[in-house]
Image (spheres, rainbow, N blue to C red):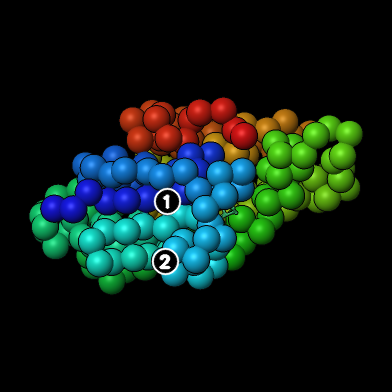
Amino acid sequence: MDTLRIWGRANSVNVQKVLWCCTELGFAFERIDAGLHFGQVDTPEYRAMNPNGRVPTLVDGDVVLWESNAIIRYLALKHIEQAPDGAGGRLYPVGAAPRARVERWLDWTLATLQPAERDLFWGMVRVPPEKRDMAAITASAKASGAAWSVLDGHLAHGRPFVEGDHLTLADIVLGGYARRWYGVEVADRPDLPRLRAWYDRVAERPGFQRYVAPPLT
Ligand SMILES: N[C@@H](CCC(=O)N[C@@H](CS)C(=O)NCC(=O)O)C(=O)O
């Protein structure tokens, strides 16, 4: 099997989810720094792989993919092809209903959570204090709290992971953003005990510890 090549800087949440996913699946990979101060993403060679000039990009032999959620779906499906009863089928359930329940969180993260939390994360982590737009940060913190309340309510099902008794792609994608939520200072952070208990659980995974837990930069 070719070693997977993953282009993207290690502090990108969208790269981190791919690395964590590879760890859950036992896939070896090589990561190449790209994006922000590492550059690379504007070269013709990179744009030929990923015309968006964003990270991550996955290269697996002649398969070249961008969009992090598409990449983790691909990795899980690749694993299912190799080992139908293995880790891929647990991360990305095969049945229509269980898979759709996982899929919704992948879509929700892109459509609802990420737009809500972007100004909070960027403002608090990547902008120096004297240049922060505190109105945008406050609005983003409020919108983030509202989004996380949706997941907290969902977790009233009482099971350990977002869609049941084991980790799925939903936990990986949401876990990366939860790292950001709990990693920045938020005034009036809503008390969401089910969310916090779930976060502490997923944060124990070796793939999270290695790729998602490091300091936010
Ligand atoms: N929806 C895309 C978003 C890709 C994206 O915006 N990635 C960011 C990093 S999280 C990026 O490339 N930023 C510019 C850069 O690093 O140069 C995905 O999930 O892959």
Q: Which mark is residue 195?
A: none
The three-letter code of the residue at mark 1 reads Trp
Element at label 1: strand
Q: CA distance from mark 1 to mark 2?
A: 10 Å
In the image, what residue occupies the spot 53% across and 57% down? 41
Q: Is residue 24 left or right of residue 173?
A: left
Point out the tag, 1 or 2, that comes first from the N-terminus.
1
In the image, what residue occupies the spot 46% across and 61% down? 46
| Residue 42 to residue 122: above or below | below
* Viewer-proximal residue among 97 and 125: 125
In the image, what residue occupies the spot 70% across and 36% down? 125
- Mark 1, ligand 1, within 8 Å: the answer is no
**Quarter where residue 69 is shown:** bottom left
Q: Which mark is residue 7?
A: 1
The reply to whether residue 168 is in sight is no
Within-10-Å neighbours for mark 1: few <14, some 14–19, many 20+: many
> Pointers 1 and 2 in contact (CB under 8 A)?
yes
| Residue 195 to residue 143: above or below | above
* Viewer-proximal residue among 30 and 125: 30
**Quarter where residue 99 is shown:** bottom left
The percent coordinates of residue 193 (x first, y second) are 57, 34
| Residue 85 to residue 103: above or below | above
Q: Which mark is residue 49?
A: 2
